Amino acid sequence: MNFNKLKIIIQREYLTRVRTKTFIITTILAPVIMAAILVVPILLMTFSSDRERAFPVHDETGVIYERMAELNPNLYEATKGMDSEELRTQVVQGNLEGYVFIPEGILDDNIAPDFFHDGSVGFSITNNVRNDIMNSIRDERLERANADPEVKAIMAQRIDLNTRTLSSSGTEEQDSGILFGIGYFMAFAIYFALFTYGGMVMRGVIEEKTSRVVEVMASCVKPFELLLGKVLGIGAVGLTQFMIWITTGAALLALAAPIMSLLGGMASPADIGMGTTDAGDLPFTIPTIGVSLWVGFITFFLLGYLIYSSIFAAIGSAVDSETDTQQLMVPVIFLLIIPIMLLGGVASDPASNFAIIASLFPFFSPILMPVRMAVIDLPLWQLFASLLFSTLTFLLIIWLSARIYRVGILMYGKKASLREMVRWVRYG
């Protein structure tokens, strides 16, 4: 292998793409979207607090409405003499956003109340109404049972569950729910990246093949060097983009807590629907991602890219246009979709034999391993085994793809079948 020629091909593939407007725009746009995802929900909750919403409560018991009004005075109001049918008509005509109906037998017979609305009421309001009714019924039943004040206080208490992960050294780590979310995000990021950059390799091969540029290039360098240079060059583009996004994302996460605390302080707890949250406190935890997880994420992204981009390159060399790739892409799509379908099972029990076997399979490792790394401390043998299997798979795939590539790039006017590509491997 001529490493000087390989270096030239890598540089060409890399510089050609990082200078394009598409690369620059997407590289800048992704951090902007990330910032928007962090900030916009808080801003929406803050500005939505300016909207006054009060729902009439038609209370046939005569006692529940008063208790609901004490719990959340800004959310409920009297019916102003209107019965249930009149309130219903007001909602249908668009004059009223909604109303609450408390049936007479709710305290004795557990009859469910009703919350009628026009469809514009969100989950937060619905949840508040449900909790207020439940708490009001509980307090009224305790009052009628002449319960001691201590019993009432005990019943009013709400206990939250804090879940913490203990590392092998005994130190406490983040909430496992947050870790699941980080793992899922990384898995889907790699999933879409494999499609994006692998497709970029395939389209590049097709363009060079149809323009006959590859014939000139093949006369100067070996097809294997040309294929490897293209794969590594475009992989460097993806790595550059990912490193920019990771650096920006880490900076955004570092700034997220103070920014959101500042923005969150603009709204009261009732406005953001958190009930017991103090003003200025965040209703969620800003996650932190360790260096080892970032390294694992980048490593498995690169291994997944090398494996799948080699396959994409072989497919691109076997066709004359992107529309002809559909049949050949079906097996590759299945290989990428299956680990996504397995994410739930792996995340629910990341230390199970099923999770271990699935994540060690080289075609699934790039997507499943980051999820397991985010949730548990993986044994070193599993990490090394996964890296070894993935590396050996890449070497085998790049060898097979190169044999297909050297024949396919010079074939025109005919779409190759899978059977024909197998013959190219034998003849290459």
Image (tube, grey):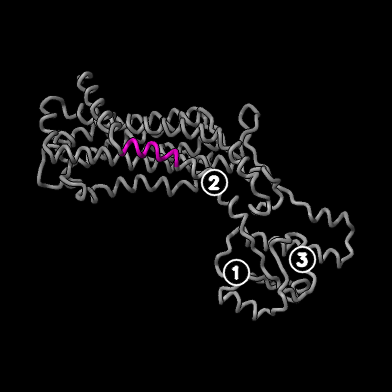
Could you give the CA–CA distance between mark 3 and mark 1, rounded to whole angstroms? 24 Å
**Is 41 on the left or on the right of 137, as rendered?**
left
> Residue 19 has which mark?
none
Vertical side of 331 occupied by 79: above or below: below
What is the chief secondary structure element of the magenta stretch?
helix
Distance from the alpha carbon under mark 3 to that under mark 2 = 36 Å
Q: Which residue is mark 1?
A: 97
Camera-nearest label, 2 or 1: 1
Residue 387 position, x and y percent, is 40, 29
Residue 117 position (above or below residue 161):
below
* Residue 148 found in image quarter: bottom right
Which of the two labelled residues, at mark 3 and mark 1, occupies the earlier sequence position?
A: 1
Task: Report the front residue among 23 and 167.
Answer: 23
Q: Earlier in the sequence, mark 2 or mark 1?
A: 1
> What's the residue at 67%, 79% (across, down)?
84
Q: Is residue 129 magenta?
A: no
**Which x, y percent locates residue 368?**
45, 40
Residue for point 50% across, 47% down: 345
Residue topped by disc 3: 137
In this picture, which residue range is highlighted in magenta?
A: 22-32
Visible residue check, residue 354: no
Query: Of the numbered discs in the image, which one, if any, rests on residue 348?
Result: 2
Q: Quadrant of residue 367?
A: top left
Q: Amino acid at mark 1?
A: Glu
x then y, percent, for residue 188: 43, 43
Relative to the observer, which residue lies in front, 317 or 201? 201
Find out whether the residues at labels 2 and 1 contact each other: C-beta distance under 8 Å: no
Residue 146 visible somewhere in the drawing: yes
Disc 3 versus disc 1: nearer the observer: 1
Question: Which amino acid, by three-letter code, is at mark 3?
Answer: Ile
Left or right: where 118 falls relative to 100: left
